[in-house]
Amino acid sequence: MKVIRLFEGKERSLLKQHPWVFAGSIQRGKADPGETVRVEAHDGRFLAWGAYSPQSTIRVRAWSFTESERIDAAFFARRVQQAVALRARLAVPSDAVRLVHGEADGLPGLVVDRYADTLSAQFLFAGTERWKSVIADALLAATGLQRLYERSDVGVRALEGLPEHTGWLRGGGDTQLTIREHDWQLLVDVAQGHKTGTYLDQRDNRRHFAQAVRHYGCAEVLNCYSYTGGFSLAALAGGAQRVTSVDSSAPALALARQHVQINGFDGTRHDTLDADVNATLRAQLEQGRRYDAIVLDPPKFAPTAAQAERASRAYKDINRLALKLLRPGGLLFTFSCSGGIGPELFHKIVAGAGIDAGVDALILQRLAAACDHPTTLYFPESDYLTGLALLVR
Ligand code: SAH
């Protein structure tokens, strides 16, 4: 067993059950990509079992803080089983559920979503890459399913020196399927869709939006960065008269139109606009358009803290424009999924946007990812999605 010895004082985060060891904390020790290592404090005390990643600045990710635990197939079977059992207790109102949320489920660098009878997974670091086949078997055993698609086409793999990879890991067949979320049906393609197929993290917020649209009687709704129209369905379900989905992806908008149709909503109440959101907001403001509710759910403007400043300006800009486009009494559901922007900073950015727009608003609700994407006490980094539901005065 290879040993990684840390510098004095660098044991603190592992002692607080935070699973990352940065390269600069390591005094000595090396291993192959994904190999299990014993991490020790400067005095030889056991800290954790982890997987070594020679190319990444996160040099080790911990599997376990228990010295007697063995990292073997049975270990992965147990962790996967625990993650799956937790989802059963959470009673998610959908047959599409995040089953494994990486570090928050004790499985660093592993994301697994279930879409009806199909699993879709991302293996994001050397450790999960090395145990891929064992993990795949554990997932099928814990869920009783037969099909697992790999979506390891993610930029972060490059930081690990791993090539991107996609395709069936277990089973095969059609990658297009239908899922149920709340009362709606959604089409998901695990090979073509964003992330592992679609954005399950916004499930609860789509329901909150439907309820708010109904409660506040919002007639005209603008859904910005709509992707396949999840929030547009929510607006229609909430009784909106006219909903516009804006996105720069034509295939996503085609699916949004299909979603309106297969869910039995009147297609004349829904429009799509294949355009840049920022330019659209500016143009509509110039034309004097106004809305009763707006959703802003942009892609990650700041994947890391280093890009937070430039991203802050981009968030502020779209929020300022959206606040100006709302009628008095209007509703804004605004989000950031940037790991580098926490809830507090996001609040500050949106407050700045309000000042510039000359609009005051009250916070109806603070929004986050659905609970099958858990944030744990010891790993705050899992709290990436933050949002505010605002009611303009
Ligand atoms: N709200 C969606 C998820 C949004 S993901 C849901 O609930 O499912 C972000 C979306 O922003 C993607 O669909 C992407 O195509 C789109 N996008 C990225 N940059 C854009 C831009 N500048 N203008 C318009 N859409 C953009």
Image: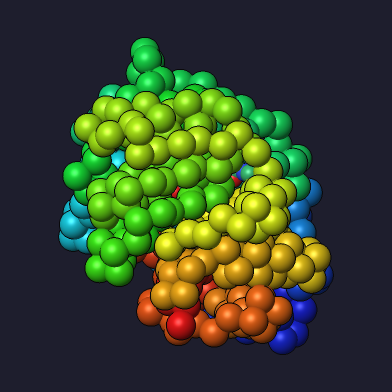
Image quarter of residue 20: bottom right
Q: Camera-side residue: 175 or 242? A: 242
Residue 4 screen position, x and y as percent: 69, 64
Q: Is residue 18 above or below residue 4?
A: below
Q: Is residue 29 left or right of residue 123?
A: right
Relative vertical location of residue 255 with respect to residue 346 in this rendering, above or below: above
Q: Which residue of the protein is positioned furthest toward the top in this rendering?
A: 173
Dividing the picture into quadrants, the one containing residue 360 is bottom right
Above/below status of 7 relative to 205 = below
* Towards the viewer: 183 or 50: 183
Q: Residue 308 in the image: x percent, y percent?
A: 75, 68
Q: Give how far across and how far down residue 377 sits, in percent.
A: 44, 78
Seen at 70% across and 37% down, the residue is 162
Left or right side of 93 for 14: right
Q: Nearer the viewer, residue 333 or 175?
A: 333
Rendered-image quarter of ligand 1: top right
Q: Quadrant of the N terminus?
A: bottom right
Q: In x, y percent, where is residue 196?
A: 48, 37
Task: Check the image and tell me how it is coloured.
Answer: rainbow
Q: Is residue 54 left or right of residue 120?
A: right
Q: Total of numbered circles in the picture? A: 0
- The reply to whether residue 38 is in sight is no
**Is there any visible trace of residue 246 in the rendered image?**
yes
Q: Nearer the viewer, residue 115 or 81?
A: 115
* Residue drawn at the location 58% of the way across and 28% of the way down: 250
Q: Residue furthest front?
A: 288
Where 149 sits versus 321, above or below?
above
- The residue positioned 24% from the left and 40% from the top of the image is 184
The structure residue drawn at horizontal position 58% and vertical position 81%, both measured from the top left corner, is 359
Quadrant of the rendered image containing residue 286: bottom right
